[in-house]
Image: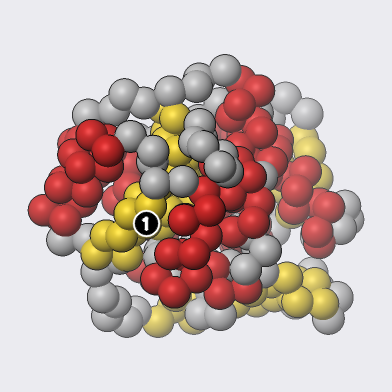
Amino acid sequence: MRIKLEDKPMPKILLVDDEPDIIEIIEYHLEKEGYLVKTANNGVECLSVAKYFVPDLILLDVMMPEMDGIEACVELRKENVLKGTLIAFLTARSEDYSQVAGLESGADDYIAKPIKPRVLLSKIKALLRRSSVNQVIKNDKVSLEINRDKYIVLSDGKEYTLPKKEFELLALLFSKPGNVFTREAILSKVWGDDIIVGDRTIDVHIRKLREKIGNQYIKTVKGVGYKLKL
C-alpha cells in the first residue's frame, strides 16, 4: 500500500434549503469555520450551482418545492464532475423509509433537523475527514484495484466511480481481505463515531456495491458483519 499526503484547499460546501432562516444560520457557522460556501433554495437551483461550483459536500434538504432533495440527489449522481462529491441530507423527517430512500438515491449520509451548529460542524468534519489522505490500494489475491487518487474502482478490467461511502466501505473491506468486519466496526470506521445512522445503512450500501461490482467479492457473515472474499 502506498499513501501520499498532499495539501488541500479548504473544502467547498453547497447548502440547499428552502428556509431562509436555516440557510442564514448554517451559512454563517460554515463560513466562520473557514469553509467556502454557496447556497441554493431548491433542487433545480442546486443542480445549476453544483455543476460550476463542484463542491466537496452538498448539504441537501429533502422537502423542497420544484424538485425535492431525493430527486435532486438522483440527478446530481448522474453528473461525472460530481462523482467525488459527498451528499448529506438535512431533513426533519426521521422515518426509516425516508432514510433508506435517501441512501438509495445515492446520498452518503443523513442528518436530522433540528441540529445544533456545533454538532453539525462535527458531523461535517467527520464526513470530510477521509478525503484528506489519498492512497492506492492493490491486492493480487482479488481482481479489484482501488485508486484513492482518482477515486475509482477497477473490477475485472471495468472502471467504476462510486459514491463516497460506498467507496470507503469497499476500501475498508479490501484493506484486509478475508477479515470479518463487524457492523459496529464498519459504522465506526466509515461513518465515524459521531455520526448516527440507521440500522439498514450498511445493508443498503453493501447491496448497491454488489449490484455494481458483482456478488462474488463481498460475503455476508450472518449475525456478525461482512468480509471481502479471498
Kindly tell me whether residue 188 is visible in this rendering: no
Residue occupying the point 66% across, 23% down: 97
Q: Is residue 115 above or below residue 207?
A: above
Kindly tell me whether residue 111 is visible in this rendering: yes
Q: Position of residue 17 (x, y in %)?
A: 38, 41
Is residue 8 left or right of 17 when viewed as pictured?
A: left
Is residue 130 left or right of 212 when viewed as pictured?
A: left
Residue occupying the point 77% across, 43% down: 207
Is residue 52 left or right of 165 when viewed as pictured?
A: left
Residue occupying the point 50% across, 22% down: 93
Q: Quadrant of residue 115 in the image?
A: top left
For the N terminus, which image quadrant?
bottom right
Please name whichever residue, 136 or 96, is drawn nearer the observer in this view of the structure. Answer: 96
Q: Quadrant of residue 82 in the image?
A: bottom right
Residue closest to the far left: 32
Q: Position of residue 142 (x, y in %)?
A: 79, 69
Residue occupying the point 53% across, 53% down: 44
Q: Is residue 186 above or below residue 229?
A: above
Q: How many marks?
A: 1
Is residue 2 left or right of 59 when viewed as pictured?
A: right
Query: Which type of secondary structure does the marked residue at label 1 adopt?
Result: strand
Residue matched to label 1: 14
Q: Position of residue 69 (x, y in %)?
A: 54, 41
Question: Mark 1 belongs to which amino acid?
Answer: Leu
Please name whichever residue, 227 or 162, is drawn nearer the observer in this view of the structure. Answer: 162
